[in-house]
């Protein structure tokens, strides 16, 4: 533990930058893989992307992976693909947790469907399965369980409800990779799983996202949707390397578009970075868990005031970030104190109180008491793999300093 009374991170760490909620560093492996892409003169979908897709899917116990330009795009095309396959109509409903990044419900609206919100569990912050059935109507078509902060949702009751009511499941796993619930990886429970490789996530590619699925038909539709709705006979320039009748079929159909799609593609450069990161996943996860455990141990004296992360016995927590909720009182004072001391914070995914959602849905936050409590009292800090013990000690010491003055 550090000496008390230090007022700035620079004094303690000998650094000038803020302790951020996330970070990224180019390592030797990333640079080597990028060099291979440069030497290949190939940027469009190719061997790096294919390898990244297949390895990532296998890590999540799925047959198919589709690499696109963001987790939001992965969610968007997942809903669009299921809407096509199952004949959903505009105005049909999808259940969405009342705490999640806004993209989770935005993509429902962008697909001309209606998000119906479900309050979350007070300890895990994930969708509360006990409240789901009360929200189901004759127009409900799917559930989007969002695995928040690195912790999987309670998928067993969610799956049971989905089977009972004939609903599809789209896993929003943009904040959780490689974590298991009852021995099964996130992204493998639903019709699709959706992941993000944006800055500060588990695997970082700059921009990027992935869909996983075990449904071969959905995989074809997903890949088409991210490629402008192109005929699936022609997905990459490698399809030009055919001969005879097969080539003529491709020539006839490679500029044919069979659905309304999007330009959601990523490049070989992002895939190369992703492959390098994938090879480091064990180190990334172990350090995040270690850092989170260190923070929990250092902050446990304040459990009278703070709700620290909870890990149910049936699942893993991989800690994309370290969430904290004040048990009583507004978070503003402590958040300002941490920010003044160069410890970066973020709100814990407030959704229903966002200005655009108040405009669209009215003042509904009061109908979701747990979400409102989290919105008012919750924030997160970083526990990423680049933080060292001295950074964690500094964070813990600042909490000690705050509660010594304000406890």
Image: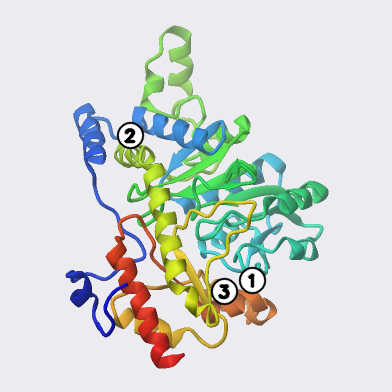
Find residue 56 and report its horizontal and vertical position in percent: 46, 37
> Mark 1 highlights which residue?
122
Please state which of residues 10 and 262 is positioned toward the viewer in this rendering: 10
Residue at screen point 64% across, 51% down: 314
Q: Is residue 217 above or below residue 150?
A: above
Q: Earlier in the sequence, mark 3 or mark 2?
A: 2
Q: Residue at x 46, y 31 (%)?
A: 54
Mark positioned earlier in the residue sequence (2 or 1):
2
For disc 2, the neighbor class at 10 Å (few under 14, some 14 to 19, many from 20) is some
Foreground tag (1 vs 3): 1
Q: Is residue 314 visible?
A: yes
Secondary element type, mark 1: loop
Q: Residue at x 26, y 78 (%)?
A: 3
Name the secondary structure under disc 3.
Answer: helix
Alpha-carbon distance for marks 2 and 1?
Answer: 44 Å
Q: Is residue 197 visible?
A: no
The image quadrant that residue 336 belongs to is: bottom left
- Quarter holding the N terminus? bottom left
- Above or below — where is 31 with respect to 161? above
- Dot 3 corresponds to which residue? 357
User: Which residue reaches farthest bottom?
Assistant: 405
* The one of 308 and 128 positioned closer to us in this rendering: 308
Label disc, if present, on residue 44 of the rendered structure = 2
Q: Position of residue 360 (x, y in %)?
A: 60, 74
Give the spatial CA distance, label 3 vs label 2.
37 Å
């Amino acid at each position: 533990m550090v000496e008390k009374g230090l007022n700035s991170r620079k004094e303690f760490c000998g650094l000038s930058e803020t302790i951020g909620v996330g970070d990224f560093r180019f390592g030797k492996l990333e640079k080597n893989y990028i060099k291979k892409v440069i030497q290949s003169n190939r940027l469009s979908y190719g061997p790096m992307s294919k390898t990244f897709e297949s390895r990532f899917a296998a890590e999540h116990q799925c047959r198919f992976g589709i690499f696109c330009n963001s987790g939001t795009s992965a969610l968007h095309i997942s809903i669009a693909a299921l809407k096509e396959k199952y004949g959903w109509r505009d105005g049909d409903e999808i259940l969405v947790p009342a705490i999640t990044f806004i993209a989770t419900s935005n993509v429902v609206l962008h697909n001309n469907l209606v998000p119906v919100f479900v309050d979350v569990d007070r300890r895990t912050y994930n969708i509360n399965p006990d409240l789901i059935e009360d929200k189901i109507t004759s127009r409900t078509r799917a559930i989007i369980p969002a695995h928040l902060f690195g912790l999987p949702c309670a998928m067993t009751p969610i799956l049971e409800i989905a089977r009972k009511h004939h609903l599809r499941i789209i896993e929003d796993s943009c904040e959780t990779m490689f974590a298991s619930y009852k021995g099964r990886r996130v992204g493998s429970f639903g019709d699709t799983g959706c992941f993000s490789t944006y800055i500060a996530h588990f695997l970082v590619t700059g921009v990027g996202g992935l869909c996983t699925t075990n449904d071969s038909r959905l995989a074809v539709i997903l890949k088409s949707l991210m490629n402008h709705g192109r005929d699936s006979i022609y997905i990459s320039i490698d399809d030009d390397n055919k001969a005879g009748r097969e080539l003529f079929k491709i020539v006839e159909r490679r500029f044919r578009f069979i659905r309304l799609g999007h330009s959601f593609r990523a490049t070989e450069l992002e895939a190369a970075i992703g492959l390098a990161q994938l090879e480091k996943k064990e180190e990334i996860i172990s350090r995040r868990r270690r850092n989170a455990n260190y923070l929990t141990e250092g902050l446990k004296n304040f459990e009278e005031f703070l709700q620290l992360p909870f890990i149910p016995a049936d699942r893993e927590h991989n800690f994309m970030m370290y969430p904290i909720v004040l048990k009583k009182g507004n978070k503003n004072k402590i958040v300002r104190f941490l920010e003044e001391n160069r410890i970066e914070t973020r709100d814990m995914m407030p959704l229903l109180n966002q200005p655009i959602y108040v405009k669209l849905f009215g003042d509904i936050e009061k109908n979701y008491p747990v979400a409102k409590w989290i919105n008012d009292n919750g924030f997160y800090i970083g526990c990423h793999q680049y933080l060292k013990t001295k950074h964690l000690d500094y964070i813990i010491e600042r909490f000690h300093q705050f509660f010594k003055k304000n406890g």
